[in-house]
Image (spheres, rainbow, N blue to C red):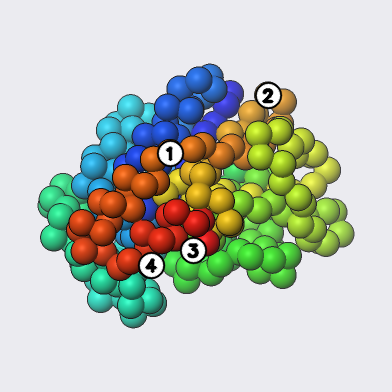
Amino acid sequence: MRLALLTDIHANREAFEAVLADMANRAVDRIMILGDLVGYGPDPGWCVDKVMEMVAAGAQCVRGNHDRAIGIADGALNPSARRVIDWTVNRLTAPQKLFLSELPMTIAEDDMLFVHASANDPSDWIYVTSESSAMPSFRVCDARLIFCGHVHRPALYSCDLTGRVMHHPIAPGLPTPLIKSRRWLSVIGSVGQPRDGSHLAAYAILDRVTNELTFRRVGYDSTTTARKSREAGLPEALAQRLMKGI
């Protein structure tokens, strides 16, 4: 079984479409989406509709902090993010808002746990950016494989039998064996707003037969997305970020 892992789409239709097109050539059996369908980008309605369609066809999805912020005065968002959420609210239908509000915070399946941010406290939106911030997720659950997003930068951590957490380098496009003597936490990079120095859309594929995880990067028309963002009157910094991946 091959499981595609997507997260942080952030209303970026062009990136989302490019990732879905790449997935179509990868013999993917199932899809898991790790939240933040909206926020930052200019096509929230289209992206939510697409995820609703995918969920109806068997995909699964958890809730992100931007999804939660729809219709809520959430002080945790920075001013730029809050401005886009306020703009987004008026562009979503009641069924789309209901869909976002009903998404679960976590999904547990077999030896896997799926969450938007840290498994340690899913509703506190903790960023997993280091070995020390990854450690609490290993401590609060017994899942062998933990998958999250939120950070917008791909990363991979493991925890050995002594409880020591290690960071592992990533080679995009090459399978990484998830050896069974360790537990693993993978931060899946962002589809719609990468922040690791590359503007390429990011997602990953888990092969449950070979026990390998492959981080993938996909080119897309970020110029069009940036233009649409400007035309919508969204913050200029967000358009610039799409082009630079920072």
| In this rendering, the label closer to the viewer, 1 or 3 | 1
Instruction: Residue under label 2, please give it.
Output: 209
Q: Which residue is mark 4?
A: 237
Task: Tell me the number on the disc at residue 122.
Answer: 3
User: Which residue matches tag 1?
Assistant: 220
Between the residue at mark 2 and the residue at mark 1, the CA separation in whole angstroms equals 30 Å
Q: Of marks 4 and 1, which one's residue comes earlier in the chain?
A: 1
**Looking at the figure, which quarter contains the N terminus?**
top right
**CB-based contact (under 8 Å), mark 4 and mark 3:** no
Counting residues from the start of the chain, the first of labels 2 and 1 encountered is 2
Q: Nearer the viewer, mark 2 or mark 1?
A: 1
Q: Type of residue at label 3?
A: Pro
Q: Earlier in the sequence, mark 1 or mark 3?
A: 3
| Amino acid type assigned to the residue bearing label 4 in the image | Ala
State the residue at coordinates (71%, 46%).
170
Residue 146 in percent (x, y) is at 62, 49
Describe the element under mark 4 as helix, strand or loop. helix
The structure residue drawn at horizontal position 43% and vertical position 55%, both measured from the top left corner, is 242
Q: Are marks 4 and 1 in contact (CB under 8 Å)?
A: no
Residue at image x 28%, y 52%? 227
Return the disc, 4 or 3, that comes first in the chain's sequence: 3
Report helix, strand or loop for mark 1.
Answer: loop
How many residues crowd mark 3 within 10 Å: few (<14), some (14–19), many (20+)? Answer: some
Q: Nearer the viewer, residue 59 or 235?
A: 235
Of the residues under marks 3 and 2, which one precedes in the sequence? 3
SS for callout 2: loop
Q: Amino acid at mark 1?
A: Tyr
